[in-house]
């Protein structure tokens, strides 16, 4: 709580009171006050973050390839002579 208060330029007691007021208003805890829990979860959360970044990069790559493929590949319908975007024949 102290570090969070420092980052927000408020005193730690003021931040604690504000959080407690929100918890009372919402009818439950907003934070789990277990410092060890964060340390135990950190490696798993880092792995989740790295996996999400990899998935985002993969999706961007697929979208880019699909965009390039759509722009550069034309097919011709047997019933018309008008080029249509799609798979090459």
Image (spheres, grey):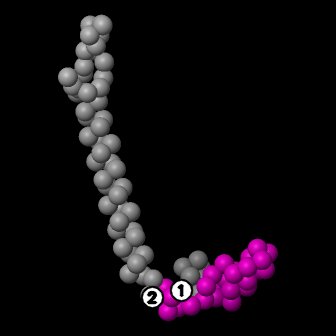
Q: Earlier in the sequence, mark 1 or mark 2?
A: 1
Q: Quadrant of residue 19?
A: bottom right
Spot occupied by residue 62 in the image (x, y as percentages of width and height):
30, 45
Screen quadrant of the N terminus: bottom right
Relative height, residue 10 to residue 73 (above, below): below
Q: Quadrant of residue 54?
A: bottom left
Q: Secondary structure at mark 1?
A: helix
Label 1: few (<14), some or many (≥20) within 10 Å?
A: few
Residue at x-position 76% and y-position 73% = 26
Q: Is residue 7 magenta?
A: no
Spot occupied by residue 45 in the image (x, y as percentages of width and height):
42, 75
Q: Which mark is residue 39?
A: 2
Q: Is residue 34 visible?
A: yes
| Secondary structure that dominates the magenta span | helix
Q: Is residue 80 left or right of residue 36?
A: left
Q: Secondary structure at mark 2?
A: helix
Q: Nearer the viewer, mark 1 or mark 2?
A: 2
Q: Is residue 36 left or right of residue 82?
A: right
Q: Is residue 22 magenta?
A: yes
Residue at x-position 30% and y-position 7% = 79
Q: Which mark is residue 3?
A: 1
Between 88 and 23, which is closer to the camera in this rendering? Answer: 88
Q: Quadrant of residue 56?
A: bottom left
Label 2: few (<14), some or many (≥20) within 10 Å?
A: few
Spot occupied by residue 32 in the image (x, y as percentages of width and height):
61, 85
Q: Which residues are magenta?
A: 11-39
């Amino acid at each position: 709580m102290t570090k969070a208060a420092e980052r927000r330029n408020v005193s730690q007691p003021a931040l604690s009171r504000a959080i407690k007021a929100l918890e009372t208003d919402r009818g439950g805890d907003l934070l789990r006050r277990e410092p060890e829990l964060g340390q135990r979860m950190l490696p798993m959360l880092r792995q989740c973050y790295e996996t999400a970044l990899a998935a985002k990069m993969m999706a961007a790559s697929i979208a880019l390839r699909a965009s390039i493929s759509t722009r550069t590949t034309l097919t011709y319908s047997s019933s018309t002579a008008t080029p249509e975007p799609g798979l090459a024949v």
